[in-house]
Amino acid sequence: MATLTGSQAPPRPAAIALRGVSKTFTRRSTAVRALEPSDLDIEPGEFVSLIGPSGCGKSTLLKLMAGLLEPTEGSVSVDGVLVTEPLPQVGVAFQKPTLLRWRTVLDNVCLPLDIAGDGGPDGRCRARGLLEMIGLAGFEKHYPRELSGGMEQRVAIARSLVGRPSLLLMDEPFGALDEFTREDLNDELLGVWQSEPKTVVFVTHSISEAVFLSDRIVVMSVRPGRVHADIPVRLSRPRDRGLRDKPEFYEAIRHVRAALDEAKGGGR
């Protein structure tokens, strides 16, 4: 049997492919259009941020990618597989860490493994390694009540990574934190992403955060949301906190802000 090699090899599917995806909710017998038909491709290994006005459908779009919502129209595919339910290769981190108060830090990180029946010694070893990577070595036996908000988010990130997802979806995970803690966690998230490359889709309201983290920034219009602009971030990697003081960083922020201002006006 012939094998495909070189230029004959089939192209690798996009990590995420959205085709004509829309979402309408029904509330008190009234239809509310949250998302207009939208197309979007995200390539394997990309870090892409979604940014836009409040209520523009960023979180809705992320939940559609995660299989937590069904599209009203169109389709969502992950690694070439049509999304009809949550997929095992997808990890999700939300704005609230939602840790189980009666479980220790280590047990919270291991929760997805326990649910999957894979919570043996190897899984717990990986969980410990992730806690060390994000600066929580020594806190394995602590409970959520003993942690700061930033530490709780670190635990939630480790939990989302413990199953080795190829795709990580993050919905404003640092939105409730102070600026200094937020910047620290941005640095740590980039460190984790560089150590364990994966596709990341990151929802944020912060332009500077999106620029610092991303390969591309998808700007969404006012509700009903749609993809208004798709902006590449042409800043070299690896990135560190010194980037935040450079002129090219502020120039990228200005570019994204101009697109966001246009999107707020509808961009039509």
Image (cartoon, grey):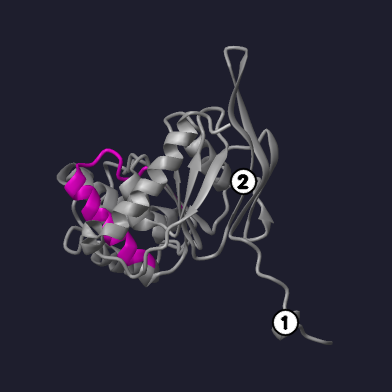
Q: Residue at x 56, y 47 (%)?
A: 65
Q: Position of residue 214 (x, y in %)?
A: 41, 57
Residue 237 versus residue 87: which sits nearer the camera?
A: 237
Q: Residues within 10 Å of mark 1 (few under 14, many from 20)?
A: few
Asked if residue 112 lies left or right of residue 70, the reply is: left
Q: Give residue 108's mark.
A: none
Residue type at tag 1 = Ser
Residue 197 visible (yes or no): yes
Residue at 29% from the left image edge and 69% from the top image edge = 129
Residue located at (72% from left, 82% from top)? 7
Q: Which residue is mark 2?
A: 85
Does residue 114 appear left or right of residue 188 in this picture? right
- Going by the numbered disc 2, the residue's amino acid type is Glu
Q: Closer to the camera: disc 2 or disc 1?
A: 1
Which residue is disc 1 drawn over?
7
Bin the neighbour count of mark 2 within 10 Å (Cα to Cα): few under 14, some 14-19, many 20 and up: few
Considering the numbered disc 1 on the image, is that residue within a helix, a strand or a loop? helix
Cα–Cα span, label 2 and label 1: 34 Å
Task: Point out residue 256 in the picture as x, y percentages from the top left corner.
Answer: 41, 46
Task: Depth check: give the residue in front, 104 or 214.
Answer: 214
